[in-house]
Image (cartoon, rainbow, N blue to C red):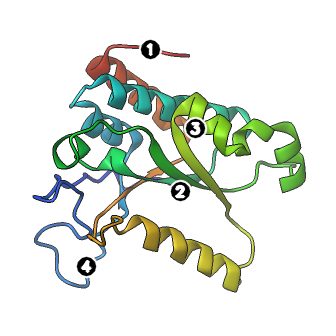
Amino acid sequence: MTSLSGSIPAWNSAGVLPPIRPNAQGNSNDRSPYSVDLSVFVDYFSYISSFERIAILDGLLRFRATLHRAGIVKGFQWLDGSFLEHVESIEGRQPRDMDVVTFFCMPDGKDQHLLLQENSALFNAEHLKSTYRMDAYHVVLGDPTDAWRVRTISYWYSMWSHRRDGLWKGFVQVDLDPSQDRAARARLNLNGGFHHE
């Protein structure tokens, strides 16, 4: 799967990404989640260049590198949370982390039990939060679409398409393809000024 290399719309007056691109028709597909290249995402959110935002973006790239080392290279991620909002102006604070759901295909030759056994830290919420500043969740792609899976996807979309106060908002989708990470790291280094392996 490749991303659409689209753009991310500007924050609206409420400080959130609009759920539907401004000026799009009511039934347009040009809506959240906005599918973009990883470097577009990094460029968009690193221009503010606060230490907190740069550290969270660095955490995302390090988290993705760990996924890739585990063989998780096919799929996509939904990115959301206060990181995607202009919380500096609407709440008077910096973002603390990023919310991410990784929808992934199982690595070749592995089942879920073996993947978890070999990479338990990747599925430990506390470890991911403290190490990468990611509030991370995982969904395996390729299994039959049963009622539970439909409910799971509906849950994430419902959770992430609204703020807690009920305001509609948008979020972003990026591909898991490792080839996107080098350009994204270069953009982060250019905009934010630090490199972490």
Q: Residue at x 34, y 42 (%)?
A: 41
Query: Mark 2, residues whose alpha carbon is within 10 Å: few (<14), some, or many (≥20)?
Result: few
Residue 72 appears anywhere in the view: no
Which residue type does callout 3 highlight?
Lys
Numbered label tally? 4
Left or right for 23, reference 180: left
Q: In terms of secondary structure, where does tag 2 sit?
A: loop
| Front label number (4 vs 2) | 4
Q: Where does the image place residue 148, in percent across and percent down from the top left?
A: 69, 80
Q: Earlier in the sequence, mark 3 or mark 2?
A: 2
Q: Which residue is mark 2?
A: 1
Q: In terms of secondary structure, where does tag 1 sit?
A: loop
| Front label number (1 vs 4) | 1
Q: Earlier in the sequence, mark 4 or mark 2?
A: 2
Q: Where does the image place residue 25, in percent across and percent down from the top left?
A: 17, 80
Q: Earlier in the sequence, mark 2 or mark 1?
A: 2
Q: Which residue is mark 4?
A: 28
Q: Which residue is mark 1?
A: 195
Q: Residue at x 59, y 31 (%)?
A: 130
Q: Tell me the distance, in whole angstroms, between the alpha carbons under discs 2 and 1.
A: 28 Å
Q: Tell me the distance, in whole angstroms, between the alpha carbons under discs 3 and 2.
A: 27 Å
